[in-house]
Image (cartoon, rainbow, N blue to C red):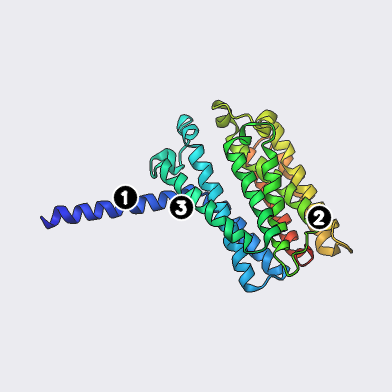
Amino acid sequence: MSVPEQSMVDGATGRRFGQLSGLARACHPGPVVAVTALMLTLAVIAGQSTGRCLLTGAAVLSGQLSVGWCNDAFDARRDIAVGRRGKPVADGAVGVGHVWAVAYTALLVCVPLSFASGLRAGAVHLTGVAAAWAYNLRLKATPWSWAPYAVGFAVLPAFVSLGLPGHPWPAWWVVTAGALLGIGAHLGDVLPDIRGDLATGVRGCPHRLGPHGTRLLLPVPLVTASAVLALGPAGSPGPWGVTALAMSGLLAVAGTVLGRRRERAAFAAAVAVAAVDVALLLQRGTGIA
């Protein structure tokens, strides 16, 4: 009797591990980790205390987790319809009900963590989280699909700024750059999936532009963000700012030219420009308020 019982225990353990693994993959771990790490680093550079930095990171992490899980749960039927592999819910690794449950749990946790940084900071951050949920549930398939990304990315540095002593409002240039980065992130994120999304009736802004139009537009908000980050703060941009702006322009041109034959080249160039923008943002981080 011990062998069958042990097999049942091992089987249950394996199923639980599979579900946990599926949940981890369903949250979009890459963007979750990247955005959380970026905001935590910005909070440190901006001058938040250690405790406030941890609260900022926890709030951003819970918000990003809720958005990622909501996205996979809501898109499950569409992913199955187009045969998209690598999605845990669509692959059957975890049930859609489980993913909805953890999405709502993360959202509930995000509320007190956000307000722990102050009333205005919490309201601003939750506005961004709400915009991301609105994208998942409705706006993704409309011409306004870019707007939640613009709002969601703009509020992140604002959340950091409002979490500083005195809760100062953020500088105009950091909010503008965040919004532009968000639009670029939306175009880059959708570009590889445009054809599959169109097959299931999704007609967001990039889908209406088509793969070619989206590829041409992709570097525009990212390079504009570079210009805002380099030239927006008071004072001279310095050698680093000028060099970063020039690099962004060259990468954008290279991506546009090479992207005519290889779509991946355009995407890679956009990622490189975004990396330059992030470096500029962190370099300017002490003056975000």
Q: Which residue is mark 2?
A: 173
Tell me which numbered mark, 1 or 3, is placed earlier along the sequence.
1
The answer to whether the residues at label 3 and label 2 have Cβ atoms under 8 Å apart is no
Left or right: residue 268 compared with residue 217:
left
Q: Which residue is mark 1?
A: 15
> Residue at position x 46%, y 42% from top?
87
Residue 246 at what x, y percent from top left? Answer: 81, 53
Find the residue positioned furthest to the bottom: 50
Q: Which residue is mark 3?
A: 24
Question: 10 Å neighbourhood of mark 1: few (<14), some, or many (≥20)?
Answer: some
Q: Quadrant of the C terminus?
A: bottom right
Residue 252 at what x, y percent from top left? Answer: 75, 45
> Residue at position x 70%, y 40% from top?
147
Q: Can residue 61 be seen in the rendering of this structure?
A: yes
Q: Picture quarter containing residue 199? A: top right
Tell me which numbered mark, 1 or 2, is placed earlier along the sequence.
1
Residue 104 at what x, y percent from top left? Answer: 50, 48
Tell me which numbered mark, 3 or 2, is placed earlier along the sequence.
3
Q: Picture quarter containing residue 93? A: top left
